Amino acid sequence: MKTHTQLALRDAVEWLGDWHPLAEQLGSADGLVTLASASACLRARPVRDVISLRRFLESYHSGILLPYELPAIQAAHSHALGNELRELVFLDQQLGNEGLLKSFAEASRRAGQAHLRKLRPLRDQRIVQRYLQAVERKDANGWHTLVYGLTLAVYSLPLRQGLLGYAHQTTRSLIYSSARALCLSERPCRALFDELCDALPAAIEELLRRREAA
């Protein structure tokens, strides 16, 4: 019997359709978050077995994913819907000042800008064109999370499923990128994924609730 996290992961793929590879490429599978740099940044012990991998992922969820990445996606989505370029650029600049994210800054810009350029043909999407121009002028960085949120808005993809899909894809990528080196089989990988992602729906609901109340 499939767990609700397995079903949510499948649903995220369906919701994102052809843009599902974006969620995966903007996550750890594209080198955005390597275990070595992320472990050092989060002051976590080196990942050597399934126990240390679990502890690292718990630190990643609590230290980066929930306080920074998901709120950035949600805010970018909101600014894109409101055609709020000034606010989007300000958010972009704020993220550049977050010390915890600096270890991933270059990879984040590289991934985000690459996917932002793929949106260039959308001439009727003013927010896309103006944000792209700001990035090309170097007034903004084009962080991957902001481009992801922008993409959700441009293609009218549901925010809740987009946030969950991003969290699932990043978690899954980190687990499976470690599986070969740690000699992990499918079963412990899936068990770890389900364990770590069990609380994500509630965390995302709380994020959306706080935003609506603000």
Image (tube, rainbow, N blue to C red):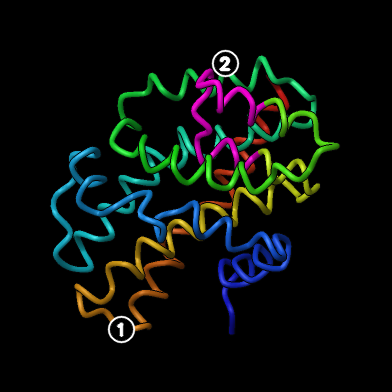
The x, y position of residue 135, in whole percent, is 56, 27
Sooner in the amino-acid sequence: mark 1 or mark 2: 2
> Horizontally, is 44 left or right of 97 in the view?
left
**Is residue 144 a member of the stretch shown in magenta?**
yes
The x, y position of residue 86, in whole percent, is 67, 14
Q: Residue furthest right?
A: 124
Residue at 36%, 74% in the rendered image? 189
Q: Is residue 179 above or below residue 118?
A: below
Instruction: Return the residue at label 1.
Output: 185
Residue at 81%, 47% in the rendered image? 156
Residue at 51%, 41% in the rendered image? 144
Q: Is residue 92 above or below residue 14?
A: above
Instruction: Return the residue at label 2.
Output: 90
The one of 42 and 212 positioned closer to us in this rendering: 42
Q: Report the amino acid beneath label 1.
A: Ser
The x, y position of residue 51, in whole percent, is 21, 64
**Is residue 64 a member of the stretch shown in magenta?**
no
Q: Report the amino acid beneath label 2.
A: Phe
The one of 139 and 192 positioned closer to us in this rendering: 139
The boundaries of the magenta stretch are: 131-149
The one of 161 and 23 positioned closer to us in this rendering: 23
